[in-house]
Each structure stands twice: as structure tokens, then as C-alpha cells.
Amino acid sequence: MARYTHTVDTKGRVIVPAKLREKLDGSLIVTQGIDQGYLAAYTPDQFEAIKEQILNNSSTGYEIRKLKRDVLGASTVCEFDGQGRMSVPAFLWKHIGVDPGQEICFIDVFDKIEICSQAFFDQQQEDEGSLADMDLTGYDIRGL
């Protein structure tokens, strides 16, 4: 896992960190994240698996309809150009409060890449405190 920062240019493009590009096949599918303030970026295979899981649910429940609209409906294929940039639509940048010229963070959490503004990330880190303050006893994670 790693966190990288880059600046969004005036056309809504951002350089995808080289370390991430090495693991990807020239594109990401970017959509709204589940957590406020974050976009989620997936490889096409990862996104296909998520899409199938969502579509395998009945659309009678409001939550699934909202999930379809907000995750599937907002999803955009973002291909990398020759300089390693991807162009993210303005509505997705607006969703996380990012304007051209602002720094964003790519956070590789292995099952997806989360994208947020640097200012939002810094504020979240300050507001949430450290892991030492959290009760993680409900999770069976050894070796931390």
C-alpha cells in the first residue's frame, strides 16, 4: 500500500503514479466511493466483479437502486495517455470537492485505489486520530 499525491490540471487530468501504472493495464474505472469525500478506482476486472454483484440483487430495494445510480451510473473508464495521465470527468472531481490546480491523493488499498483531495485527507487524519485510539479487538488481525 502506498499514498501518492499529484495535482489535477486545468483539463481535469492527473498523472497516475508510476508505481500504480506498473500494476495496471492502461486504464482504471473511476466512480463515486462508498465513503464521502472519496472516489474509487478499479481495474476493469475488479469493477466487473463488483458490477455483477450489484446487478445480482433485486432492484426493489432503494439501497440497490441508489448503489446502481451512484456507483454504476457514475462509473467512467479513464484510459492513461502517453504521459501517464488519466482524465477524470468534472462531475467526479466535483463530487469530492476538487478543482483544477488542487492536489489529490491516490491511496492504494489493494482491492481498489481511493482518490481524495489532499486537504480532505489531511483533515481526516487529524479528525480520526491514530489507530492506537481505535478498538480493533472485533477483528481477528494478527501481527499488527
Image (cartoon, rainbow, N blue to C red):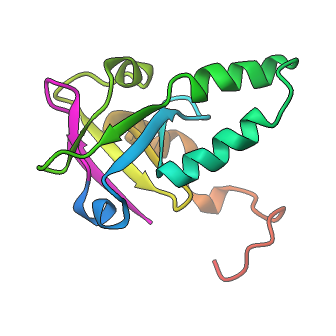
In the image, what residue occupies the spot 74% across and 73% down?
141
> Where residue 91 appears, x then y in whole percent?
38, 17
Looking at the picture, does residue 131 appear above or below residue 104?
A: below
* Snapshot quadrant of residue 69: top right
> Where residue 138 appears, x then y in whole percent?
84, 61
In this picture, residue 142 sits left or right of residue 90: right
Looking at the picture, does residue 130 appear above or below residue 120?
A: below
In this picture, residue 56 sits left or right of residue 109: right
In the image, what residue occupies the spot 70% across and 42% down?
52
Residue closest to the far bottom = 143
91 magenta-colored: no
> Closer to the camera, 105 or 90?
90
Quadrant of the snapshot with the N terminus: bottom left
Looking at the picture, does residue 19 appear above or below residue 58?
A: below
5 magenta-colored: yes
In this picture, residue 80 sits left or right of residue 24: left
In the image, what residue occupies the spot 52% across and 62% down?
110
> Closer to the camera, 56 or 22?
56
> Closer to the camera, 99 or 19?
19
* Snapshot quadrant of residue 135: bottom right
Quadrant of the snapshot with the C terminus: bottom right
Observer able to see residue 81: yes
In this picture, residue 76 sits left or right of residue 53: left
> Closer to the camera, 128 or 82?
82
> Where residue 86 appears, x then y in whole percent?
25, 40
In the image, what residue occupies the spot 35% across and 58% down?
25
Observer able to see residue 129: no
> Where residue 6 appears, x then y in whole percent?
22, 45
Q: Give the range drawn in magenta.
A: 1-16
Total marks drawn?
0
